[in-house]
Image: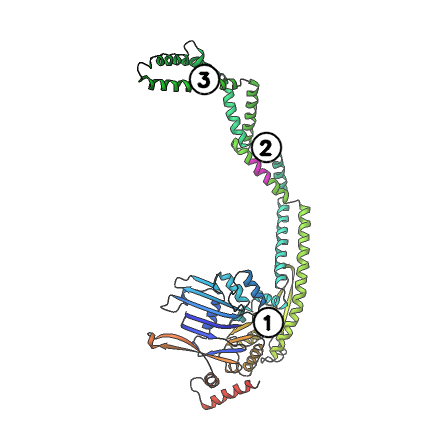
Amino acid sequence: MLRFLSIQDFVIVDRMELEFSPGFTVLTGETGAGKSILIDALSLALGERGEAGQIRNGCERAEISAEFDVSGSPGLADWLHENDLENDGDDSGTCLLRRVIDASGRSRSFINGRSATLQQLRAAGEQLIDIHGQHAHQSLLRSEAQRDLLDAFSGSRELAQTVTAAYRRWQSLQQRRMTWEQNAAAFLQEREQLQWQVRELATLNFSPGEWQTLQADHSRLSHAASLLEATQMGLEILSEGELATLAQINSVISRLQGLLDYDSNLKTVLDLLESAQVQLQEAVYELGHYQQRLDLDPQRLQEMEQRLTAIHAAARKYRVTPDELPYLLATSTARLEELAQGGDGEALAKEEAAAREEYLKLARKLTTARDKAARTLAQQVSAAMQTLAMTGGEFAVALIPLAQGNAHGMEQIEFQVSAHQGLPLRPLAKVASGGELSRISLAIQVITSKIGTAPTLIFDEVDAGIGGRVAEIVGAMLKKLGEERQVMCVTHLAQVASAADQQWQVVKSADPANGGKITSRITVLDQQQRIEEIARMLGGVKITETTRQHAAEMLQIQSKG
């Protein structure tokens, strides 16, 4: 139940704080006073889209906070706990929703003081309040809205979603099968080509690492004679010839060492020569080791050349570079697997048939639930119509069969109505009278609102287009509903207002102390103030004593039930 609402700098409201009570509450006021601002502000706190234009002129931000008693909503308590948004205070049975919109249009949302997403705010709001707007009857003219309402009334929303998923799976498999049939010859040819290609490339057994090694080894083997000749010449010059470099350096070092005692300055030269001697000796060792490893095997060279020839031939054949051959093998293998997963025509047809049977089974179950709920809803709305100046009228929910079915089941849902006895049933969308449409819509909304779990129901001028005795009946309907749920209604009808347990008045005025800015105020009316307000609603500009007596009588009659 909604306990408290705080509105700050929203449209023409500077600051407003309201405490709510159980039962049936009406919100009244002159046209243009801002009765619907309360609903708009509350909708923002429940996750509706906001914009900078809703901020009161001259202010930096608008802020709306709504406090709820959720002690009777275990489902919401579990949801808050799962999302780590529960109230950690002493009052765990309270849930606080808060929304802030700044001048740039940026919005921030909070649940129990913790930052929340707009989606989380909506999810919580759906379990707290159900708002019926004054144009709700317009949405009821749409077939999809009628279908959704019937599914909600029958408790089949989840089943309807399952039917949709089953239908889409069936259609997807059907499309795969049709595509396969249309391209069967092309797929078969492609698969044969890929199988041959994959076998050939797999037989080649070629990898990127091998390509680099093979090129290096072939280069070395093909120039082995030149390498061996250069290596031998180097060894001759450095260590094996008659005038070998190492022998001459050793001779110089030996000669200089014998003269070191006569001049120590030779030490620097000796150090350099000894270092060069070590480096040359290492070079000779490495050169000799390299010479031993040189392979002059012509057979090995021939094998390498044959391997290179095969690789280059495959690369030319498939119009890729040699190092791209492994990637080609991988992509060809993947495509072959994809074609294999596509199955053959017979396997696809069996899978499609199984999906169709699953869809039909679920759709028939949904049809049964809809048919049962349609009869119940038709009976209850028809009964309500008898009290709403449509004696003899009838409401029906038609389930129009669809030969192949669709994503929403095996039938189209159509609300039909006969406003008076003797008139044939016609689609609700073709009801000519706006007043009749409003009354039927109200009856549907009141009846279907009982199926919801939201503890608070708000009706925003849903009584438009009715009056007199019918308005009294509407007020009685809302009052009775208020015995089970917290009900609020924005109304312009005195008959509805007099049926309420409490009445609030919205007044719009200019504030001289604030530059003449227009502000909106809400006052909780006592008994005498209710008489004056209902008299205004009855009599307009000039209120007579007779009008006041009439208003007092209406309240007295309602208080006695």
Q: Looking at the picture, tell me which residue is in the foreground, 394 or 223.
A: 223
Q: Amino acid at mark 1?
A: Thr
First reached walking from the N terminus: tag 2 or tag 1? 2
In this view, which residue lies farthest toward the front? 261
What's the residue at 50%, 78% (across, down)? 26
- In the figure, 55 relative to 276: above or below? below
Of the numbered discs in the image, which one, if any, rests on residue 448? 1
Q: Residues within 10 Å of mark 3 (few under 14, many from 20)?
A: many
CA gap between label 2 and label 1 equals 68 Å
Q: Amino acid at mark 2?
A: Leu
First reached walking from the N terminus: tag 3 or tag 1? 3
- In the figure, 484 relative to 316: above or below? below
What's the residue at 64%, 54% (across, down)? 170
Asked whether the viewer can see residue 223, the reply is no
Residue assigned mark 2: 201
What's the residue at 63%, 44% (across, down)? 341
Q: Residues within 10 Å of mark 2 (few under 14, many from 20)?
A: some
Residue 140 drawn at (x, y percent): 56, 69
Q: Which stretch did the figure color magenta? A: 328-334
In terms of secondary structure, where does tag 2 sit? helix
Q: Is residue 332 magenta?
A: yes
Residue assigned mark 3: 284
- The reply to whether dot 2 and dot 1 touch (C-beta < 8 Å) is no
